[in-house]
Image: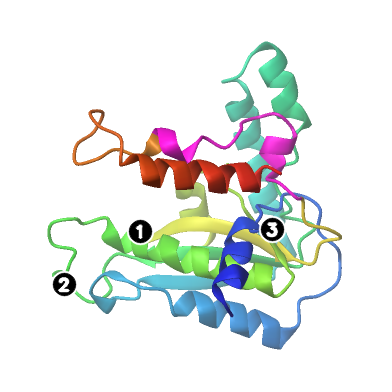
Amino acid sequence: MNADDFYNLVFNRRDVRGEYLPDPVDTDVLARILNAAHHAPSVGYSQPWNFILVREESIRRAIHREFEACRQREAAHFDGERRHQYDRLRLEGILTAPVNICVTCDRSRAGPAVLGRTQQPDTDIYSTVCAIQNLWLAARIEGLGLGWVSILRPKVLKDLFALPPAVEPIAYLCLGHVSEFHARPELEIKGWRNRLPLENLLWLNQWGETRPEDALLASVRRLQSEAEK
C-alpha cells in the first residue's frame, strides 16, 4: 500500500447504519479483521480488549429493544425540524448485519500498575478505541461496512453479556456487506452536520492564541478544497 492508498482508505471509511445485505461474512475475512484489531497499539502493551461475537438471535433482539428505548430518550433532546431530521435517520443494523461484535476493555489486564497508565488511567480505554479503529479500517479495505451503535446504555450491555466487574463495554459494532458506500458521511449528506474546517482547529503553542504558520494553513486549505471537489 502506498501513501495514496492509505489516505483513500481513511477518507472513505464510513459509519454504516442500516444498509446491510444478508450475505454472510467469510470466516477468513472476519479473522483478518479481528487480527488487525488485535494489532492495535496499547498502553504498556496491555492489550485490554476482548471481542464478543454475538450470534444468538435472542441477545440481538434484546440489544435492539434497548436501542429503541434509548433512541426515544435521545430523541427527546431535539425539537422542531431537528427532531424530524433525527426521526428520519437510520442509526443501526443490529438485526440485519450478519455480524455483531461487542468490544470490551478489561481494566484489570496487566495488573494494577501498567506502564504508561499510572498518570492517565483511561489510556486502556483509548487503546481499545485504537483497536476499534483498526477493525473499522480493515473492514473497509475488505469491502465490508461497519457501524458503531452508541445509543445504548453501558450498564445494560454489561448485564446482557455478563461482564466481570473490571470489564467495560466500549463499542457495539455491526459488520457486513453493503450495496454501496456513500461518497460522504451519511450525517453530512442528510444535513445533520458538516465537517469542520481543519484550519479552525489548529493552534500554535497554546490554546486560542496563535495559528500555525501561513504555509501550513495554506496547505491545509488546499487539501480541504481538493476533498470537496
Residue bearing the label numbered 2: 115
Identify which amino acid the numbered label 2 is placed on.
Answer: Leu
Q: In this view, does 164 lie above or below 61?
A: below
Residue 102 in view in this figure: yes
**Circle 3/circle 2 CB separation < 8 Å:** no
210 vs 143, left or right, is: left
Q: Which of marks 1 and 3 is in front?
A: 1
Residue bearing the label numbered 1: 126
Q: Which residue is drawn at 51% across and 48% down?
A: 156
Choose the circle earlier in sequence order: 3 or 2: 3
The percent position of residue 31, horizontal first and vertical second, equals 62, 84
Mark 3: few, some, or many residues within 10 Å (few <14, many ≥20)? some
Which mark identifies residue 60? 3
Q: Which of 10 and 100 is in front in this view?
A: 10
Q: Residue at x 41, y 71 (%)?
A: 49
Identify which amino acid the numbered label 1 is placed on.
Answer: Tyr
Q: Say which quadrant the C terminus sits in.
A: top right
Residue 54 in view in this figure: no
Q: Which of 209 and 166 is in front in this view?
A: 209
Q: Which of 224 and 86 is in front in this view?
A: 224
Choose the circle earlier in sequence order: 1 or 2: 2
- Residue 190 part of the magenta-drawn span: yes
Say which element carries label 3: helix
Q: Distance between the residues labelled 1 and 3?
A: 26 Å
Identify which amino acid the numbered label 3 is placed on.
Answer: Arg
Mark 2: few, some, or many residues within 10 Å (few <14, many ≥20)? few
- Magenta residues? 183-200
The percent position of residue 32, horizontal first and vertical second, equals 61, 84
Say which element carries label 2: loop
Mark 1: few, some, or many residues within 10 Å (few <14, many ≥20)? some
Hey, which quadrant is residue 195 in on the image? top right
